Image (cartoon, rainbow, N blue to C red):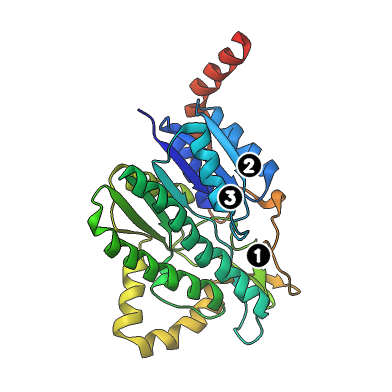
């Protein structure tokens, strides 16, 4: 029997890749994000491979929005089996120059909204005595880097929340909480970030693909694990940060300026921290060649044919 999977942050990056991956598995999907037109686009991608999809425009920072999302899911499909929370924004800038409203909104989106998603999902899972919640953390939930204070604060908080909830769920063996921690990923979050540094951000190498992170998410839905790291250098960075903090702090600034920043100077702007930009909603950020695009197109042909037959039959 197919699962009912909620994907929050489904229109861009890891969330969009995860939606496609679950669709390819035959799961029934509820997709949530801020931009209705981008949601419609993702719905089309997932329906093309035969998935049944409900879209619910959702701003995770609006009080009650995630409750409404859960209610819409249960109204349509009767239950929630898996809740995947990938919604996130970020901001670049020295802490002292980053506007307080921007810092607060990043934390509100990346941490407090994730906590609300956990509250809503776990309430439904407790009633059913089963379910899997998958939160998207970051290697920056275990280390730090200059100019990303709001994002690191949110992701460190999310790591603490996940560990605490895992301890509290020991009385419910069929309710699982998984934390997936990517390193550098080829998504648009860098171009969509708020910038108060004078330069745009970029993922420092080595860069992995959002599809690889999506596979880790789907794997957690199949075989739940407490924590998964996606990124070859993640373990090394964590060891350096913990065991050699002085050396780490000496190196991280120059490395960040050389490898983690990109392009010409830019004026301060808010990116998508406060409002969506549908034109920038896509899976890849363009830092790596999308070698999987032809393969996905071929894989999607059978589903597209079936969907077309169904439409004609109606």
Q: Residue furthest top?
A: 313
Mark 2 surroundings within 10 Å by alpha-carbon count, few (fewer than 14), some (14 through 19), many (20 or more):
many
Secondary structure beneath dot 2 equals: helix
- Mark closest to the chain's N terminus, 2 or 1: 2
Mark 1 surroundings within 10 Å by alpha-carbon count, few (fewer than 14), some (14 through 19), many (20 or more):
many
On the rendered structure, is 253 left or right of 173?
Answer: right
Where does residue 275 sit, x and y in percent of width and height?
70, 59
- Which is more toward the observer, 166 or 236? 166
Q: Residue at x 52, y 17 (%)?
A: 306
The answer to whether residue 3 shows anywhere in this view is yes
Q: Residue at x 51, y 27 (%)?
A: 49
Where does residue 174 sit, x and y in percent of width and height?
26, 47
- Mark closest to the chain's N terminus, 1 or 3: 3
Where does residue 30 sit, x and y in percent of width and height?
52, 39
Total numbered labels placed on residues in the image: 3
Secondary structure beneath dot 3 equals: loop
- Which residue is disc 1 drawn over? 273
- Which residue is disc 2 drawn over? 39
- Which residue is disc 3 drawn over? 12
Q: Residue at x 51, y 39 (%)?
A: 73
Q: Is residue 303 above or below residue 113?
A: above
Secondary structure beneath dot 1 equals: loop
Q: Quadrant of residue 178?
A: bottom left
Where does residue 153 sit, x and y in percent of width and height?
49, 76
- Mark closest to the chain's N terminus, 3 or 2: 3
Asked if the residue at tag 3 contacts the one at tag 1, i.e. Cβ–Cβ closer than 8 Å, the answer is no
């Amino acid at each position: 029997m197919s699962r009912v999977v909620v994907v929050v942050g489904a229109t861009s990056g890891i969330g969009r890749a995860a939606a496609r991956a679950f669709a390819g598995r035959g799961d029934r999907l509820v997709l949530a994000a801020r931009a209705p037109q981008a949601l419609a686009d993702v719905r089309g991608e997932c329906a093309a491979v035969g998935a049944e999809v409900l879209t619910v425009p959702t701003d995770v920072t609006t009080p009650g929005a995630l409750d409404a999302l859960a209610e819409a899911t249960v109204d349509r499909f009767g239950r929630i089996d898996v809740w995947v929370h990938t919604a996130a924004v970020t901001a670049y800038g020295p802490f002292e120059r980053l506007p307080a409203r921007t810092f607060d909104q990043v934390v509100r989106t990346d941490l407090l909204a994730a906590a609300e998603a956990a509250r809503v999902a776990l309430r439904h899972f407790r009633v059913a005595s089963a379910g899997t919640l998958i939160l998207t953390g970051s290697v920056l939930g275990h280390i730090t880097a200059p100019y990303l204070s709001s994002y690191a604060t949110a992701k460190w908080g999310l790591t603490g929340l996940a560990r605490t909830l895992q301890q509290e769920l020991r009385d419910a063996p069929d309710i699982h909480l998984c934390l997936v921690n990517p390193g550098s990923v080829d998504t648009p979050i860098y171009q969509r970030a708020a910038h108060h540094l004078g330069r745009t951000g970029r993922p420092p190498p080595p860069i992995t693909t959002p599809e690889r992170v999506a596979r880790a998410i789907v794997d957690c839905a199949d075989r739940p694990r407490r924590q998964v790291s996606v990124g070859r250098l993640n373990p090394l960075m964590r060891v350096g940060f913990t065991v050699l903090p002085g050396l780490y702090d000496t190196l991280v600034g120059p490395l960040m300026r050389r490898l983690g920043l990109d392009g010409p100077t830019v004026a301060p702007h808010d990116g998508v921290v406060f409002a969506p930009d549908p034109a920038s909603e896509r899976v890849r950020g363009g830092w790596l060649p999308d070698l999987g695009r032809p393969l996905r197109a071929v894989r999607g042909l059978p589903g597209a044919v079936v969907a077309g037959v169904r439409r004609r039959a109606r």
